[in-house]
Image: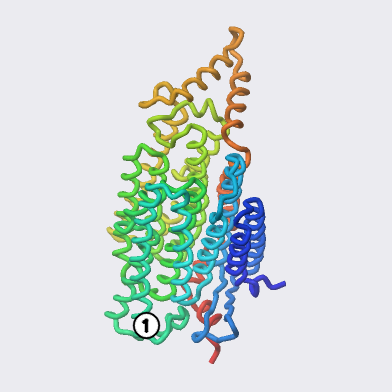
Amino acid sequence: MNFLDLAPLAVVLPIIGAGAAFLARRQVRTQRLITIGVLCLTLVLEAGMLATVWGGESYAIHIGGWDSPFGIALMVDGFSSFMLLISTLVSLAVLFFATSQGLADGEEPGPVSVFHPAYLILLAGVSNAFLAADLFNLYVGFEILLTASYVLLTLGGTAERIRAGTTYVVVSVVSSVIFLMAIAMTYAATGTVNMADLAVKLPELDQGPQLILHVLLLIAFGIKAAVFPLSLWLPDSYPTAPAPVTAVFAGLLTKVGVYAIVRTETLLFPGGVVNAGLLVVAALTMVIGILGALAQTDFKRMLSFTLTSHIGYLIFGVAVGGPLAIAATIYYVGHHIIVQTSLFMVAGLIERRAGSSNVTKLGSLAKLSPALSLLFFIPAINLGGIPPFSGFLGKFGLLHAAVQDADPLTWAVVGAGLLTSLLTLLAIIRVWARIFWRRAADAEVPNQELVDEAAAVAAETVAGGAQNPSLGMKLAKELEAKSLPWGMRYATGSLVAAGIALTIFAGPIFQFCERVAAELIAREAYITAILPLG
């Protein structure tokens, strides 16, 4: 079986599944089975695709038998396959998290259950964007995921979610209009929107029109990737959504914008004309984002700011260019998707366990929820860049690539990257100290339920007048199991384990990323796979 010939199913399967899930809109259990089954099938398909292109193959699929540049083409190479697999893996883990939460809450079927259809449509849009080989099909992918994400963001219909959803839609529509303008101008200037054809024809344009098209595309993708100063919408939008929605948004939506930037910068505009501007944007994104994180008292809002901050590392890698920097960027994208998603899932667990994600109300969770403490600690230090985790390896690769023949501006951005890493670690340590380590009674606004539970665990520990930690630990585990369904914990643990696996297998994964980076920079494999010979 050639998995590459089946690549369109990465888009088609979720769309068919969404239709089936909507037909079963009054049967939540059936919807869950359909969604889980579709994602499992898609994951197997994408694993096969990645294994097929692992050695460096690029493969184009011409929809309807129409040759490029006249027909729609899908491109399967190492970069797109890697992004597809990571995105589906994360989506499946979040789906198990949401399913366990729904079962624990005893959800009753409503008149219309839209979560599962919208979730599958979101994944279809993401997959379409990763496979798109022309700008208009990429635009279609963005619009599909925009429609689904608005539905997911406003689930529940609360005033806060409607307000956040309105902001999100307005910003996304502005981005889409800019993108559509860029597509129209590109077609007017070159007569094509096929990216392989554009790679050949754009160099024939004068520098002025090239620069205008380049900047328009960067602005459109920069809004979607949430780079500064186009990122101000994100911290107000993501934390208001339900925990599973926030987690999948954090993992996927901004990375589609990053993917588009990497693809277009390497394929369409390889000269590095705007690299100095990208370096400045990267530094501002990193530093301002992490300063915003330090100012937050709500854990989910803090994570939203770290999410935007660490997008700066990815823009930094694109601006530096070269095989090593692009390879480190691809590796760091995988790390960032997994770690940020797992931390947002942990935030959902904290909110469920303690009734709030506001650090001023929390404490004693290390004693009350030992498993939750571990689920937080591992991805948190990974995000902070502590050796030997993938966060450290990705940042080291980026900084190592940057300091080779670096100019003063690049050195300044390297300094910003190091400062951001240290401040990220500071933000994580503050959360750990306040939510997990200090006594619940010492919180600025004590949660009486946590205070009482901590006192009960302490009383069990000293039961009978003798110190007996096992009794206190047993009670803590019972309280944790009662408030946190096992499915939510295991779903989160699976992503934490995936982050560890990214560290354990860093050698072969980074070698793969280096091959992908070499293909992206060389461009020939992409162009010859899509355009007909002669």
Most extreme residue toward the right, as rendered?
1
Viewer can see residue 205: yes
Q: Is residue 146 left or right of residue 231?
A: right
Viewer can see residue 489: no
Residue drawn where x is 38% and y is 86% of the image: 190
Front position in the image: 394 or 227:
227
Give percent across and percent down for residue 121.
54, 63
Give percent across and percent down for residue 129.
49, 68
Q: Is residue 412 left or right of residue 1?
A: left
Q: How is the image coloured?
A: rainbow
Residue drawn where x is 40% and y is 25% of the image: 446
Most extreme residue toward the front, as rendered?
111
Question: Is residue 215 positioned above or below 307 on the image?
Answer: below
Amino acid type indicated by mark 1: Pro
Give percent across and percent down for residue 522.
48, 75
Residue that badge 1 annotates: 203
Give percent across and percent down for residue 193.
43, 81
